[in-house]
Amino acid sequence: MMKSLKVELHHLNDVRKIIAEKQLMDMDYKIKTEKDYGYIPIKETTNETLIQEIKDTLQMPELEIKNTDTELTPTKHYPKSITEALKGKLNNTEIENLKKSFDTIGDIVILEIPEELEPEKEIIGESTLNFTKRKSIYMKKSPIEGVTRTRQLELIAGQDNPITIHKEHGTRLKLDVTEVYFSPRLATERKRVSDSVKPGEKILDMFCGIGPFPIVIAHNKPCEITSVDINEYAIKYLKENIELNKLKGTIHPICGDINQVAKEQLLDKKFDRIIMNLPGTAYQFLDLTIKHTKNNGIINYYEFSDSFGQGIERLQEAAHKQNKNVEILTNRKVKSSSPGKWHVGIDAKITEK
């Protein structure tokens, strides 16, 4: 039989607060109200001495412990972490490995599950769904591939709906996780770059994807951003994201290869800032970038590396070929990309010699 306190409704909230403060409430059950009374579930260890203290505090001489046959509803307990969600299902090392490859994009979670754990993918998926309360759990089936930067995904729990809206720094970013590349782990970097932009800048984002850099920047600063990507789905969602957000700046989406776009549309146009977030191959476009950077213009350059030296050297070589100087403003490790390697960022100012 459940132990509870039977309390008149007009005293219920006051008694509940004190019971909670003294940690006497049985949190496995919900408080129930019935006609003129409420029933507060209390721990079996609660004794008359403790109840007397409450009586004295609230001046309620009629308050007493009841062993009631009133049925109380059990409280639903949800795991507070992925570790708790998978406790007893995977060992600690396996759980830690999963936590490192856990990305939440809007109401979708994407996991990287090691091959040896794939037989447990449904358990992992359902546990993750229960913990995160998101609509869909996908697992990675391939690395990022091709010029469109997409990967194969497999649904392991929830709804098979890869379209979502991700919220970041006051903006909304709509995307299909199966058709475009997006990393929520770059949110801090996007905010950092946005904060460094001066009002009125003319910016080129050479590999814009669905537009997280342009949208975050234009949301905060009055500027003009030319945004290019070869993935037609990315540009489709960029256009939708422009409509979804209240922007102080202007964004011009262009679908195409940046080399061709530069030749046919950019021509001799120069920019105050060029963003090069294509860390695998951005170095191949440095000559083009230097050409289109204004005197005293900024390049936000990214690459995968184990140090900053390689990227700095590449920037210096590209600038030297066009008789320009490079001043390195900042460099930082943005996020880990693989053991021993980082997604590094280098901010450089380009000036005439």
Image (cartoon, helix red, strand yellow):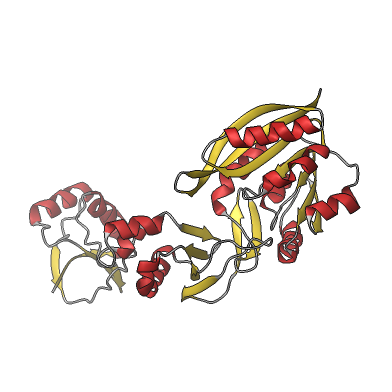
Who is closer to the viewer here, 40 or 136? 136
Q: Which is more toward the observer, 201 or 12?
A: 201
Q: Quadrant of residue 150?
A: bottom right
Please state the horizontal and vertical placement of residue 276, each as a whole percent of the image.
69, 45
Give whichever of 129, 291 is nearer the camera: 291
User: For the image shown, how many numbered marks are present on the structure?
Assistant: 0
Q: As drawn, which residue projects farthest toward the top? A: 353
Q: Quadrant of the C terminus?
A: top right
Tell whether 280 sits left or right of 36.
right
Q: Is residue 249 left or right of residue 31?
A: right
Q: Residue at x 90, y 53 (%)?
A: 264
Q: Is residue 119 left or right of residue 255?
A: left
Name which quarter of the figure residue 51 lies in: bottom left
Residue 309 screen position, x and y as percent: 58, 32
Residue at (72%, 37%) from the top-left corner? Answer: 299
Q: Position of residue 295 (x, y in %)?
A: 82, 29
Image coordinates of residue 259 in percent, x first then y, are 81, 52
Residue occupying image coordinates x 53% and y 36%: 307
Q: Residue at x 59, y 42 (%)?
A: 189
Q: State the quadrant of the N terminus.
A: bottom left
**Residue 80 visible in the displayed image:** no
Residue 149 visible in the displayed image: yes
Question: Vertical placement of 153 versus 200: above or below?
Answer: below
